[in-house]
Amino acid sequence: MNKIKDGHTDVLSTRRLCTNIIEDCEQILKALPSDENAPLPTWWTNKLAVSAAYINSDRDYLVYTMQQASTEEVEDSSLQDQIMTIDFTADDDMIPPSAKMVEESQDASEEG
């Protein structure tokens, strides 16, 4: 099994990790029993649930938090109308938990 070396930068390493995750998930989907009621080991489904939560949290950080930061950097007011912004100060149940945690950690670091 040949692995492609992707360098040691964060973005290149992340791209390779994501590619590996996608390949693994495709193989899992193909290997699942055709019977939707077939049992799977509890330890295995628990690991998958934890993995999904971590991936979801990583995605939330990049999509919501990084998007907010890039919006603040845009100086051209004509582009501001085209960028979706998310108000993290609103008390909204729709804000992903990981985005709330990032906001809380930023607030704590500013205070102390």
Image (cartoon, grey):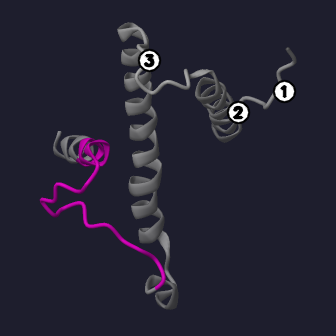
Amino acid of disc 2: Arg
Which mark, residue 38? 3
Q: In the rendered view, does 78 fall on the left or right side of 111?
A: right
Please tell me which residue is depicted at 36% across the width and 16% down the height of the picture: 46
Marks 1,2: beta carbons within 8 A:
yes
Number of marks present in the image shown = 3
Q: In the rendered view, does 45 fall on the left or right side of 90?
A: right
Please tell me which residue is depicted at 40% across the width and 17% down the height of the picture: 45
Under tag 2, what secondary structure?
Answer: helix
Neighbour tally class for label 2: few under 14, some 14-19, many 20 plus, Cα within 10 Å: some
Of tags 2 and 3, which is closer to the observer? 3
Instruction: Give the CA separation, mark 2 to mark 3.
Output: 32 Å
**Magenta-highlighted residues:** 82-103
Residue 11 position (above or below residue 41): below
Of tags 1 and 3, which is closer to the observer? 3
Label 1 or label 3, whichever comes before in sequence order: 1
Residue designated by label 2: 16
Please tell me which residue is depicted at 39% across the width and 54% down the height of the picture: 65
Amino acid of disc 1: Ile
Residue 17: x and y, percent? 64, 30
